[in-house]
Image: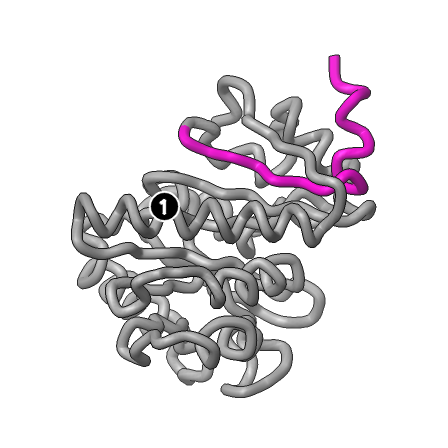
């Protein structure tokens, strides 16, 4: 899937990269609402996007026409600090006029996780069409080259017949995640990659290292925003 060159912007630090990401998303919201009357945003978990979301909360966005979907989620109780949803609420939902019906949370507290994954796929279809096409998917990059909760060697990485899957335990917790077909179907993809621990993985992604799950994300209509620490090894690329 790693065909073509990935467009990468390098910013001085994580704050600058987050500011650029928030402004980019705000513009994308405006364009989608003008063309389709609504905007569907897929958000990844982890620490990296939280500053971006806090900045986005202060942007002039028409939130009542925005839907927010989760790219992935840890299997943990509702309200747990391990849940991506908990941090999403703190960084964005509590700060903007976004109706609760527009927050599409993965129901990982359900005892029937397989059923919950199937229902989440159906939920995406109701807001983004069949098959669902998200307007923007924001992705992060793990130091091991994973993205979403798609980890090397996990069967979820090879799921092609569903938009939502369960992955095995990773750092002690099972995950629910959008699959590669769902991610690659998005109209636009925004990577936000910060921190020195991501430098090797980002260098591998930039050169299309096939061993990295992140390299299986399409590059067309994708933009990667990095800080200098994460981009430190990019100059080593041929």
Residue 201 image offset from top left, x and y in percent: 72, 38
User: Which residues make up the magenta segment?
Assistant: 221-238
| Residue denoted by label 1 | 28
Q: Callout 1 environment at 10 Å: few (<14), some (14 to 19), or many (20+)?
A: some
Asked if residue 190 is among those painted magenta in the image, a careful observer would answer: no
Q: Residue furthest front?
A: 60
Side of 215 where 114 appears, left or right: left
Nearer the observer, 42 or 62: 62
Residue 137 image offset from top left, x and y in percent: 43, 49
Res 155 seen here: no
Q: What residue is shown at x 42% (from left), y 55% (from top)?
A: 178
Q: What residue is shown at x 67% (from left), y 42% (from top)?
A: 145
Colour scheme of the rendered structure: one colour
Q: What residue is shown at x 71% (from left), y 51% (from top)?
A: 14
Nearer the observer, 224 or 30: 30
For the C terminus, the quadrant is: top right
Residue 9 higher or lower than 105, as above or below: above
Asked if residue 231 is among those painted magenta in the image, a careful observer would answer: yes
User: SS class of the residue under badge 1?
Assistant: helix
Q: How many marks?
A: 1
Residue 160 image offset from top left, x and y in percent: 36, 43
Nearer the observer, 25 or 42: 25
Residue 69 image offset from top left, x and y in percent: 37, 63
Res 38 seen here: yes
Residue 12 higher or lower than 103, as above or below: above
Q: What residue is shown at x 47% (from left), y 45% (from top)?
A: 24
Q: Quadrant of residue 204?
A: top right
Residue 153 higher or lower than 105, as above or below: above
């Amino acid at each position: 899937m790693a065909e073509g060159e990935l467009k990468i912007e390098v910013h001085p630090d994580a704050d600058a990269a987050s500011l650029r990401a928030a402004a980019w998303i705000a513009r994308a919201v405006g364009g989608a609402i003008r063309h389709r009357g609504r905007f569907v945003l897929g958000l990844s978990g982890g620490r990296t996007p939280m500053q971006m979301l806090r900045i986005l909360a202060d942007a002039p966005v028409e939130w009542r026409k925005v839907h927010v979907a989760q790219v992935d989620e840890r299997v943990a109780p509702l309200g747990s600090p391990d849940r991506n949803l908990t941090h999403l609420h703190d960084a964005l939902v509590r700060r903007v006029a976004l109706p609760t019906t527009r927050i599409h949370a993965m129901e990982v507290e359900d005892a029937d996780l397989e059923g919950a994954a199937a229902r989440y796929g159906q939920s995406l279809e109701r807001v983004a069409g069949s098959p669902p096409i998200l307007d923007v998917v924001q992705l992060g990059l793990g130091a091991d080259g994973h993205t979403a909760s798609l980890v090397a060697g996990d069967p979820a990485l090879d799921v092609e017949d569903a938009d939502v899957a369960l992955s095995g335990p990773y750092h002690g917790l099972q995950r629910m995640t959008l699959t590669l077909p769902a991610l690659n179907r998005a109209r636009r993809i925004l990577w936000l990659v910060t921190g020195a621990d991501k430098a090797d993985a980002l260098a591998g992604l930039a050169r299309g290292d096939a061993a990295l799950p992140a390299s299986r994300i399409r590059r067309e209509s994708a933009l990667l925003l990095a800080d200098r620490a994460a981009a430190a090894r990019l100059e080593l690329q041929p």
